[in-house]
Image (cartoon, rainbow, N blue to C red):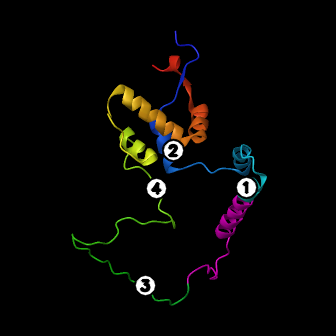
C-alpha cells in the first residue's frame, strides 16, 4: 500500500537541531562553497573557518594560571558562606548562564513558535491542516540541508509505524 514511503517526526528534529545545532566540518563548508564561482570569496571563507577553529581550540586548551594544590592545607581556616535571602520582588537572576552567548531558541516547540522563530512572522491560519503543512515545509526549508541530513538519518518506513 505505502511501500517505500518514509516519515520523520519533526518535533524531536526541531528540538535537536535548534537546541544543539550540529557543528559544520571543513569538508561540509567546502562542499557548500563549491557552488560559489568566485574563488577568492571561497578561499577567504575557508581561511576564516580555519581561523575560527584554531581560536576555539586555543580557548579550550589553555593551561590554568594558578597551581593546583593537592591535599588539605594544615590549620587553614574553614570558609563559612552566608546564605542570602532574596525577597519576593528581587531582580536576581534565577538561572546561571555558562557561555558568552545565550543560545537563541523558540519559546516552545509548538509549530507556531518554531515558525515564528525561524521565519520571523506568525503562522497565519494555524491549526488548519493545509496552513500547518505549508508552515512546517517553510520551517524545514529554513533549516535546509541540516534538516535533510537529520531526516536521512532518522527516517523510518511509514508501514513500520503501529
- Callout 1–callout 3 Cβ contact below 8 Å: no
Q: Helix, strand or loop at disc 1? A: helix
The residue located at (53%, 38%) in the rendering is 141
Callout 2 secondary element: helix
Circle 3 sits on which residue? 79
Look at the numbered disc 3 and give the secondary structure of its residue: loop
Rendered position, 60 above or below 80 = above
Q: Which residue is mark 4?
A: 104
Q: Nearer the viewer, mark 1 or mark 3?
A: 1
Q: Which mark is residue 41?
A: 1
Please state the horizontal and vertical placement of residue 18, each as a whole percent of the image. Answer: 49, 47
User: Whole-percent x and y of residue 94?
Assistant: 34, 66
Structural crowding at the residue carrying mark 3, measured as other residues with C-alpha within 10 Å and reported as few (<14), some (14–19) or many (≥20): few
- Is 52 in the magenta? yes
Q: Residue furthest left?
A: 88
Q: Residues within 10 Å of mark 1 (few under 14, many from 20)?
A: few
Whether tag 4 and tag 2 are in contact, CB under 8 A, the answer is no
Cα–Cα span, label 3 and label 4: 38 Å
Identify the image quadrant of residue 52. bottom right
Please tell me which of labels 3 and 2 falls first in the chain: 2
Which circle, 4 or 2, is nearer the viewer?
A: 4
Instruction: Give the structural element (helix, strand or loop) at label 4.
Output: loop
Residue at the spot 32% in from the left edge and 31% down from the top edge: 127
Q: Earlier in the sequence, mark 4 or mark 2?
A: 2
Label 2 crowd bin: few (<14), some (14–19), many (20+), radius 10 Å? few
Quarter of the image holding residue 86? Answer: bottom left
Q: Is residue 63 magenta?
A: yes
Left or right? Give the position of 26 relative to 94. Answer: right
Amino acid at each position: 500500500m505505502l511501500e517505500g514511503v518514509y516519515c520523520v517526526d519533526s518535533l524531536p528534529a526541531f528540538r535537536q537541531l535548534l537546541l544543539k545545532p550540529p557543528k559544520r566540518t571543513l569538508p561540509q563548508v567546502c562542499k557548500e562553497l563549491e557552488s560559489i564561482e568566485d574563488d577568492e570569496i571561497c578561499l577567504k571563507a575557508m581561511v576564516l573557518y580555519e581561523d575560527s577553529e584554531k581560536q576555539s581550540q586555543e580557548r579550550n586548551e589553555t593551561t590554568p594560571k594558578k597551581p593546583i594544590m593537592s591535599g588539605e592545607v594544615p590549620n587553614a581556616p574553614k570558609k563559612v558562606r552566608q546564605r542570602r535571602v532574596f525577597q519576593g520582588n528581587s531582580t536576581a537572576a534565577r538561572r546561571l548562564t555558562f557561555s558568552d552567548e545565550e543560545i537563541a531558541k523558540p519559546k516552545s516547540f509548538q509549530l507556531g513558535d518554531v515558525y515564528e522563530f525561524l521565519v520571523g512572522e506568525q503562522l497565519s491560519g494555524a491549526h488548519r491542516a493545509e496552513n500547518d503543512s505549508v508552515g512546517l515545509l517553510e520551517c524545514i526549508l529554513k533549516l535546509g540541508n541540516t534538516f535533510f541530513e537529520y531526516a536521512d538519518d532518522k527516517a523510518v518506513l511509514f508501514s513500520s509505524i503501529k
